[in-house]
Structures are given as structure tokens and as C-alpha cells.
Amino acid sequence: MKENFDHVNYYENRELSWLEFNQRVLEEAENKENPLFERIKYLSIVSSNLDEFFMVRVASLREQFMVGYDKKDFSGLSPIEQLDKITIRTHTMVEEQYHHFNKSIQPLLKKNGLNIVSVNKLTAQQKDYLEEYFTDVIYPVVTPLAVDSSRPFPLILNKSLNIGVLLNKDFEEVFATVQVPSVLPRLLEIPNGIDTRKDYILLEDIIALYIDKLFIGYEVICAYPYRIIRNADLTIDEEEAEDLLIEIEKSIKKRKWGEAISLEMSKNMDKRLVNILTKSLSVEKQDIFYIDGPIDLTFLMKVYKFKGFSHLKYEPKEPQIPRDLLGKEDIFEAIKERDIFMSHPFDSFEPVIELIQKASKDPKVLAIKQTLYRVSGQSPIIKALAEAAEAGKQVTVLVELKARFDEENNIQWARRLEKSGCHVIYGLVGLKTHSKIMLIVRMEEYGIRRYVHLGTGNYNDITAKLYTDMGLLTCNEIIGADASAVFNTLSGYSEPPKLNKLTMAPTSLRKKFKYLIEREEKNALQGKEARIIAKTNSLSDQGIIKALYKASVAGVKIELIIRGICCLIPGLHGVSENIRVRSIVGRYLEHSRIFYFYNNGKEDIYLSSADWMPRNLNRRVELLFPIEDAIIKKRLLKDLNILLRDVVKAKIKNELGEYKRIDRRGKKIINSQEYFTQEAYESVKNYKVDAKKESF
Amino acid sequence: MKIGELDSEGNFKLLDSYRKIAVLGHDTFTHGKLTFASVEKVCHILKNFKKSMKDYHVQIHKAMTTSAIREASNKDYILDQIKINTGLNIEVIDNSQEQYLTHKAIKKSLVDFEQIIEEGAVVAVIGAGSIQITLYDESKLISSQNIKLGALRIREVLSSLERETTKYYQILEEYIIASIEDLDFFKKTSNYTHFIAVGGEISIINRIINSDDDKAVNLIGRQDFEDLYESLLNKSTDEIVTEYDIEDERAEILLPSIVLYKKFLDYANTDKIIVPQITLTDGIIIDIFEEQNISKKKEPSVREIIDSVEMIAKKYHYNNQLNLQVENSALFIFDKTKTLHGLKTERLFLQLACILYDIGKYISIDKYQIHSYYIIRSLAVFGMSKEQMEIIANIVRYHTMDIPSFNDENYKNLSKNERVIVAKCAAIIRLAVAIDRSHHKKIEITSVRRKNKQVIIKGKSTENTLLEQWTFKKKADFFREVFGLYPVLNIKREL
């Protein structure tokens, strides 16, 4: 019988696989090789990741369950079965996280002069200080809300930290709640008279300490912090949405009211309070997390930014001038000479920003077109685009408003661009525009020339320093024509045309990947060498996984570098013995998407904005672009090789779905991100030395 | 829409192309006019196109429309709406102009076009509403015929039958054969070396057969084509949509199209189909750049028009030798009296009128100029518009003794400017015909000069030219009426 690779044992559930990714982040928090402050950052990321996971993924499964949708996923789990497994996995993960925070991180922080004090350890002096702080600073901004027959249970904001209070009034128990004000710092430094150590106290602890001041005339029985996560998934019917902008604005308002998905409470919380909260918020028992420590560890990100602890962080690294641009004064001229490749954050993202800025002022530039997905708050790109429009250039900006959790931010700058005269387009109905492409049309001496930037990451100067992404600058005519065609499609001015070098999702990217994988399979079956290396953030598309299994069975050697979700299981007998999966979780978030196909010795390399997920291939506008410049190709091949030799931050996935450290014995100790950083530094240094030599 | 530029060497380079579908044919063909919704849709698309023109600082643009708007009864109102909404002046072109531009694009896309037409070629342009078949041999245009039988038209006619028969394709085949077998060239056996096919559906067929191998010009092997033909015949529209990943509307007309192409391929009997990836838009843009260049490139296309008109005239027993004499005389006079008449491009009208002036004799010698008029105005000539043919027909109508009159519908309907052209050309052609009254090519004109109130036409002859001189005098009045100068014929007798 012909194997069709449908068996549920061949697939891992995507939610559970994602949780394993979060576990790897947690392991980085636990990794003693990492500097202490980097570890608390990882700890904070574990928490914010889980928040988003509950708000979106768990909420969605819950909805499916509620409406009676019980279709199993490819790993054979129905929504309720997935929810059960998620509950178990997240509870142990949170336990592990807090165990580590309490037993390891907090003592280390104290040892390093950062002490988070609990209320019962406060000195009389410190209490005086806090009482004053409470009356002067906290009291004016808190709003205690009591619940009784005339006052219904108030709206508790998603992700807000609150204090549940049990009061006694005339022998009757009354519930009240106070939101811990988010405008005040979560950690307050308190004087301790010691030079070598700073004491801090949590804001909710201060409020709890003086809670009776908020309820004069009541007797406070007890007060404990709690926090809820609500359903935040945003679904709007675009077919009916007259103006997407308005719909999203409405939806942001609505989001505050999503159903409660999980409830975090202090592990010591009074049973009466537990009952009141679970009932009022309609939360099930399994959705309650009893927290042994401060609720919501995302505040650790603030701690990470405290001044004076740089010795406990990674040595700061500056993105370097990209190799291809060393010694080049005019970026347009440099691109005209040959394609420019950049590997961020090792290479600086500045040249891309500079290019846009320069284009906005260059009288020869006629038009600038760009997709924007997530940009930073004070984006220099937005500024440059607005200036270009004001200077009379045709500026078309394709803004993706549906970038999750960023809508409010996006709407603001979209309005700003419109005001300046940019032609702002809000994407195609039903499709998120995830592709990263910029096109500059320039009238030069010998006619129109198009400069194109294509990337794997967003046009965001902040994340370009934190994510590993790659970008290409080119004035290749065919790519230029393709880029024009892509924008004509995105603007709705033209039907999707046939592209020559670029491949676009959702129209043809899936087909292209299938073709590329099957070509290796065919070559392997003919006894030729066949190899695939793919680096993506996630792999959860069944079609792709099946194609990879088939290729593996045919004998194609497959190396996958998948940072996050990977539903493919490697090493299965007769299915995936030729596939190896590794995940790199390091200082920078692995974000580049690279696809290598041996192609009978031709060695084709592509970069893309797309992951191997159904959403990327079916519901998003994505681009895949080839790397054809021989020098750049060579460099990318080398980079891929380094990634595959990383034994420090890479973990290998086994056939049980576990990610294991790589046995370093007999291997060169390579940390790929450090390697690339050093390489970027050295190329600039060497260039400077050479330039100096030349000048003598 | 296509946007292009001329590079430093004056070569045309395509920069960008836009394609947006608004189906108008259904409105016009079934209801006779376009709906407001359709016009709105067109305006929306055109506004976006206009915005895109700014991206490249477009200097010159041309907007053209064909049958869907041309045949709409509310055409003028629509064009006005479009003009108000988008600022674009839409030029309505007729079928001959459309074909002329399409052929321009074909020619441009085929590097070895000259060789192809020398060796002989059948060119089939299959549109939604009509087919144009053009034959070339020995570098000459043999024939060009338009048939109102497009793939969409066939589909509409026969769609109700699809549900009633499992042998839909047989009916389709029968219908198509019946519709085209009367065409002239189908009656003769042919021996063409090349078959060139153009149209939306042949592009799809090409994509299916040649998969992603998408060049500017593709070749489809005959065997591949016939294999696909066989397999398509037994497929439903749904199957075609899913199997070949094409849009519903296009799948529906794929079958009638492939049957049409098959018939023409069988006729041409070549082992492959040449498929240039071009559309009318390519022709328009090439035309714009040629106009810009006003270079020698214009010359061969005039030649083509003349070739095709001569081919048509032959059907009406046109005598090449005889008419050539008239043509030479007329053009000689025309060229020598430029300051008098001030015409330029109208020379071609005069030339074509000389070729066609007596084709009415095919019907009857009596009042043949009127028969000629009706034949000429009904001709679809490659590269000539309906309005232009009407002018030529009028020139011919008044080449004898008749004086143009507002009692004549044909003359009354002309614009003022057109009436002037007709009168001037008719005056000249009258003299040219008179000069060869005996059809014996007795006189060779040697010079045309103005002297006071006279235009002296000098010629030489070895024979007695009394008949010609007498006729000339009779026809001279009209010339004087038009130009205010009296023409005199001076023949020097040579022995």
C-alpha cells in the first residue's frame, strides 16, 4: 500500500509543540551559562508568551469547543482533548517557572544587590515611607469597587493586575476589587540605608498593606492579588466591513470584553475569594493558576532595564555596516554595482532606513512603495515616507492593520501617512499582508530604474536589532518588474500577474514549495544527491510536512532549523529517518526564513517572509525571493553551515518530540549568533585596517 | 494598461503592466448598452490606472476601447462620464484598427517576423466576440478577414445545449465548422509554414502545455496541442477549473476556443503553433512610441494597408496595371500641388481611392461609382478606421461627373473637414482618370506647375491623345471650383 503519511502518530499538535518552544525559552532562563539579567528577561518572555497563547490560541480552542466543533487535528486531538493537554502542560510550566524564580533567580538577584522584599520583612522606617507613598501617590489613582446587590461585578480588564478584597460590613461579607494602577511602577525602591543592596517592594504588596484605608467603615478580612486573561482574538467580517479602519477601532474597544480564559491568583488566596471570583468571571477550576510568587512576571522586563546592572547582561553589540556596503558612499550606486545582502542584527538595518530617507529627498526618485506590517512607535521610516509624499513623490504604503495587538498603534501612523499625502492602502480583503518589500522608482539618465528591498523581517528599526533577519537590496530589472506587479496586485489596481523571479502567497507559494521539495525527491529516486535545508520560525503545514516525509523516504537529506512550532516528527522509522530538526533559541530571536535545495548541484537558495504554516501559505500575502548573486549565495551557504554546527544554542528534536542539547564532545564549540556577530565586527575592522594601509 | 519608456538608444522598454477585469461585453451584447454600475467600475479602475501613471511621470498616454463600448447605444454618454470622472479621453477604435494594432504587436514580438511572412503564415486572433484571420505569403498580406464568431459568442449561443447533451463538443464542432467553412481561404488548400495564434485562451492553453515555461513567445507542439484537445473534449467546466487551476469564466470559453484554434491549425497544417504573449495594449503602446519616433518604421505599415486593399480589389476584378496608371498620375499631381491643397497623410486616401475607384464595375458598369462607394464603405481594411473608409468611398463616389451635394446622404454625413478632403481628392482623381481615359497608358506626366490662374500639367506621349485632352477639359471645371485654379493639360507629342 502506498504510504500517504496521514497517520496521527506522524504529527505533533501545534499548541503542544508551541508550548515546548516556550519551555525552551524557560530553559534559557534556567541556563547558568546566561548572564543573570538575560535570564530574568527570558523569564519575562515566558510569561508574556503564555499570556498571548491564552488570549489567542486557548481562547480559539475554547470557542471551538463551545460551539460544538470537535474535529480532530492531524495529531488526532479534538479541541477539548487539546485543552486538557494544554492545561496540564501549562500548569507544570508555570510551576517550574515560579520554582525557578523563587529558588534561583530571586536569591541571585539579592546576592547581586537587588532585593525584592516581602511585607513581613519591612522595617518600621520602611513602613513609614510606604505609608506616605500610599497616601501621596497611590491613593489618588486607585478606585476601589465594592460589589453588592446595587453594584454589579465590575469589568476586570484583560491582563490587569487586581486585588480581591473580602470585607465585613455589619457581619455581612462584601467583595471588593481594586485595580493595581498600571501607571505606577510595579517595583518601588525603598530606602534601606545599605549601599551595596537596593530593596524593592511590589506595588500590589503596598496596596494590600494599606488596603483598609480604601474601605473606611469596613473591616478588611483579607486581600489578595489576581489577574485574568481574556479572549482577545480579533475576528471581523471583512466582506461586510465598509471601512476596515473603523471596524478595527470598534473591535479594539470590544476586546476589553472578551470571555475570561484563565485566572491567576495568589496561592494563599482565601477560599471565599476564590469562589466569588470563579463564579463572577465564570472560570473553570482547571483554568485557575495558583501562583507562588508575584503574579505576572512580565514586570521583570522592567527590571531588566534597571540602570547599573550592565555587568549582568550580554556585552552590548552594535549592528555593523553590512560587508557589501563597506566603503560605499552612495547607496544607489552601490546597489547598481551589485546586489547588497544584509544579515541583521549582525549587519545594521540603518542602510535600509537611509535608503528610504535618501529616496525621500532625491529629486530623481518618482515613487516609493512599501509594505508595513509592524513598525516601531517613532519609526524613522514613517517619517521619511511622509516627507517623501510632502516633497511631491508618489508614495504608496500598504499598511497591515491586522498585525495582532498592534492595531491601535498602526492606525495612528496610518493616519499620519495619509495626512502627509501618502496613498495608504489597507491590504487585500481576507489576506494579511505579511510580505516585506520596498520599491523605489528612480528616473535616471538612461531611463527608469527600480531599486528593490526584499526582506524576511519587518521594517522595524527596533526589532531589527533583536531579531535575526535577512534582507536584499537589488536593482535587478526582473525583480523590479515583479515588485511593481506585486504592488499593483496589492493595491488592487491589477489582477495577480505572472511573476518571474518572485513567488507570492497565497497564489503560488505553496505550489512552488511543493515543486521544489518534489524535485529533490525525484532526484533522490534517480540516485542523485538530494538535500534540503530549511530555516523557518514554524512548521505546522500538513501539506509541507507530507512532502518532506515523502522526500525523506526517497532519500533526501533534510535539515530543518525551526525555532518554534514544529509539528513534524523526525526520526520515525520509514517516515522521517532522513530528517533532522533543530531549534535555536539564543540572544536574538531567530526570525529569518531560508530555503536551500541542492537541485542536482545547482544549490538554489531562497529567502522568504513566510513560515511553513497554513496561515502563511493560505491566508497571507507572502513573498519568496531567490538569491542569485554568486558571492551572496556563497555567504548564505556558509551561514547555513554555521547554523547547523551550532552546539551551544541549538537543540535537536528527537522522535519523541523532546528537544535535547547537542553532545558537544569532539565538536567545535559554535554559538552561531556569536559567530555571526564576531564575523560582522571583524569584517568592518579588517576593512578599516585595509583602508588605512591604502591611505599610506 | 502598459507603461513603457524609450531607452537611450530609442528602443522601447516595457516598465509595468496592469490588468483589471470589468466584464462589459455581457451588458452591451445582451442589453445593447452599459449599465451605470459597469461604468462606475470602469471609472474606478481607470482612476487607479491614472494614479499609477504618476509613479512613472508618464508623458503621453492613450486610452482606447473596442466593441463593448463601441457597440453600446449609450456610448457617447459613457465616454463623457469617463471623461468627467477620470479626465481620460477614450478613443473608440473599430475592428480594423484593433487588428492593425494587434498585428503591430505580433510583429514586434516576433524577431523573425519578416522571415515568417516570407515563408507564409496564418495568423489567428481569437477574441471574445470575433476572430480575425490574416494570411501572409511571400512577405505579402494575402487576406485578412473578420468573423463575428468569438469564443464567448459561441459559448453564449450554445450554453443552453450543454445540459442537454453529453456530446456537447460535437455540436460545438459542427457549429464552428458551419460558421467558418464559407470563408474564402477555407475553400482553397493551403501551404503555410507558420501558424501564429493570439488570444487570452491560447495563453491558457500554452500555460497548461508548457507549464511554467513562460517566455515572450512560446511554441506549442502540434501533438501536445492535439493531446490536450482530446482530453479537454471530455471534461466538464468544473473539471477544467480544478484540474488546470483557471477561473470559471475562462474555463467556460476554453472549449470553444480550442476547437476554433484546432480548426485553424488543421487548415494551416503546421507542426507547431507560435504564441506571442501579446495583447491589444502592446500594439497601442508600440503605436504611441512609433508616433513619437515618426521614423521609417511607419513605412511598412502603409505598405501593408496598400497590399491588403489590392488583395480586396482583386476580388472585384481589379486590374493592377490599369489602376496603377491612374494612381501614378493622381499621386504625381497630389505631390506637386501640396501648397495648393495642404493635405499630407490624406495621400493614402487618394492612393487607396485610385486602387478601388472602379471596383463597382464588378456589379454594373452603369453608375459604377455608386456601387464602388457602397462596396468601399463596407470593407474592413487592416489599419483603416470606418470613418477613413467612408472618406475614401466618398472620393470614389465623386470621381466621375457627379458634383458633391448636400442632397446626398453620404456627403451630408461627413464633417466639414472631411468634405473638404473628399472634394480635393476627388478633383485630383478626376484629372488622373481623364488622363488615361482610353486605358492605353498613353500619357506620362512630366511636370505640374502653377502659372497665374492656371495649373499646367505637362506630359508626353507617342500616340494621339485627343480623347484624353477632351475628357480632361470636361473634368477641369470641378478642379477649378475646388481650388480656384484652372487645370490645363499640355501633351508633347513624341515620335
Image (cartoon, coloured by chain):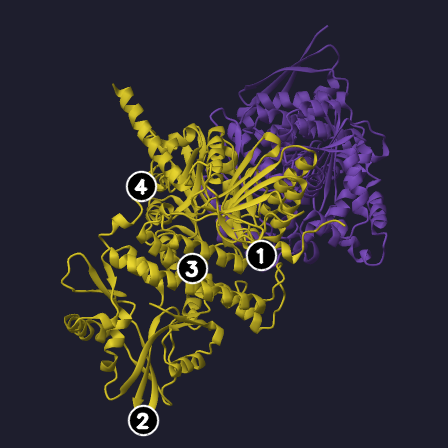
Chain colours: A yellow, B purple
Q: Earlier in the sequence, mark 1 or mark 3?
A: 1
Real-space Cα distance between discs 2 and 4? 64 Å
- Give me the disc on residue A49: 3
Do the residues at pointers 4 and 3 share their chain?
yes
Q: Earlier in the sequence, mark 2 or mark 4?
A: 2
Tag 3: amino acid: Asn
Number of labelled discs?
A: 4
- Circles 1 and 4: CB atoms closer than 8 Å: no
Helix, strand or loop under label 2: loop
Residue for badge 2: A171
Task: Using the image, name the chain to which the residue with label 3 belongs.
Answer: A
Tell us which disc is closer to us: 3 or 2. 2
- Circles 4 and 3: CB atoms closer than 8 Å: no
Helix, strand or loop under label 3: helix
Do the residues at pointers 1 and 2 share their chain?
yes
Q: Is residue B364 visible?
A: no
Do the residues at pointers 3 and 2 share their chain?
yes
Q: Is residue A38 above or below residue B402?
A: below
Helix, strand or loop under label 4: loop
Real-space Cα distance between discs 3 and 2? 43 Å
Helix, strand or loop under label 1: loop
Residue depicted at x 85% and y 31%: B188
Tell me residue B372's x, y (percent): 75, 35
Tell me residue A335's x, y (percent): 41, 32
Tell us which disc is closer to us: 2 or 4. 2
